[in-house]
Image: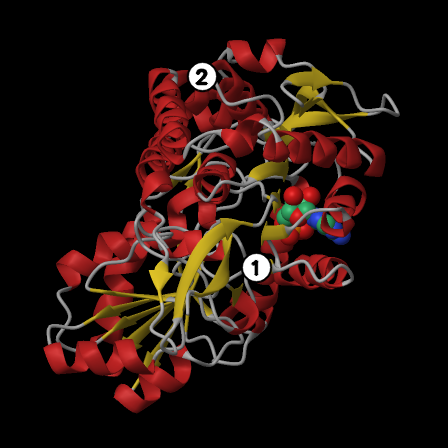
Amino acid sequence: MNAPLPAHAVRTPAAHWIGGRFVSARGGATLPVVDPSDGAPFAAIGRGDADDVASAIAAARAAYDGAWGRTAPADKGRRLAALSRAIGERAEEFAWLEARDCGKPLKQARADVAACARYFEFYGGACDKLHGETIPYTPGYGVLAWREPHGVTGHIIPWNYPLQIFGRSVGGALAAGNACVVKPAEDACLSILRLAELASEVGFPAGTVNVVTGLGAEAGIALARGEIDHLSFTGSAATGTIVAQAAAVRHVPVTLELGGKGPQLVFDDADLDAALPAIVNAIVQNAGQTCSAGSRLLVQRSRYDETLERVGRAFAALRVGPAFADLDCGPLIRASQRDRVAGFLDEAVAAGYRVVARGTIAADAPAGGYYVVPTLVADVPADARIACDEVFGPVLAAMAFDDEADAVRLANATPYGLVAGVWTRDGARQFRMARAIRAGQVFVNNYGAGGGVELPFGGVGRSGHGREKGLEALLGFTQLKTVVFRHG
Ligand code: ADP
């Protein structure tokens, strides 16, 4: 049932991308690449170690001190724009590769390619607009504050949106003038290797973008401990703690984009027709493997039954199948993730929470694929594990609230604070909710899982700190230097 392999997956060697070429792992070890749609291996990647990471950091340092560092900002911008165009020209190649590697429905993979290209377009336009400041000071002095790149930035990337997260993280870092070392997730490396190769093809100097593949506990930790100047990590909260501690040894600044438990608040005056598709999409997109997923549905009691009935009908119609069948949901990334999500559901059923509706797995979906049916669970207590922990699967936990204060209490009842949605026609209430909800992004009468390229993104609490995306990210990828002149 699976489509033929994308050409690039076949010709990608099981190797890192370092200094502008493919380089085998020094130890010669490889890891299999498994197709989540059928559980079968279809390619291999290099299993990097600390030596591989050190040579990638050295290559990045040489580019930063050399050709990339000497490239004028406007010229840097042209390279980013060229990469954006090159990605767009190969959109189908990238979409098929990403769909195969991550198990995403093709339409999702296509959207990810478009977002990746857009990041390089957006950040390409920003390269020569990173202005500094003059600061009024004592007479006889002039003060300039300008932004400088950190130097070599490390990027540890998860498997859920490799293309998008590479775009936002590496795009921002390059625009700010850094050279990059990327450690993609062991489950999903292929599109990122291709992007790095393409960056060389469109004229980035060798070493500007390097990719070391391998396991988190080997290559990932080596990068966090390595001679880098900034680390950007996207992944689970638990791993975020490990990498932040490792980077702290060298006092390397860290941006952490961790998990979420996004609440969708539906008030009594909400436009349900508008809310419904957004509520369903926010948890079904990428099979719920999205840090900004809307995984909690909080509904005012007077509209609770009606909302659940309607969301339930939409869930019952959802269809799950292999990436290339392009249904509503694909498989989860790996067997352990599928089992973890199934465990949450078993626990909810055992606790007696009400399962309102489930989708269906297509009859011809390969038996070896990592499928989980989208499930709507209602009347979930606020302190239930399914209501507090990040499930990272297509599972929506619903509960009722009485008034605004109750809604805010529930919305803020988890340690996470990444994204929230508020559905109400009342303008003053919209404002009150946006103020009261503890989150990095609040969407009012819409819900953008991840939001747009232009919109600063990041969390509070267990969701991490620092912001990526938008122009705000450039502040994180630079440091401010204050220069004080005495002119008498
Ligand atoms: P998951 O558990 O869903 O795989 P992680 O947060 O562990 O999510 O993975 C996100 C990224 O972090 C991946 O690139 C992974 O290889 C990397 N990673 C995992 N463990 C470590 C670690 N101990 N040190 C550094 N990076 C890690």
Q: Quadrant of residue 35?
A: top right
Count how many numbered circles sit on residues in the image.
2
Q: Which residue is mark 1?
A: 256
Q: Check mark 2 vs ligand 1: CB closer than 8 Å? yes or no.
A: no
**Mark 1 secondary-structure assignment:** strand
Residue 288 point in image, percent of width and height: 46, 50
Q: Residue at x 37, y 22 (%)?
A: 82
User: In the current view of this chain or complex, which residue is farthest to the right?
Assistant: 27
Q: In this rendering, would 456 be left or right of 481?
A: left
Q: Residue at x 50, y 76 (%)?
A: 414
**In the rendered image, is residue 173 in sight?**
yes
* Residues under numbered marks 1 and 2 in contact, where contact means CB atoms less than 8 Å apart: no
Vertical placement of residue 150 versus 427, above or below:
above
Q: Earlier in the sequence, mark 1 or mark 2?
A: 2
Q: Which residue is mark 2?
A: 202
Residue 41 point in image, percent of width and height: 68, 22
Colouring rule applied to residues: secondary structure
Q: In this rendering, would 148 be left or right of 445?
A: right
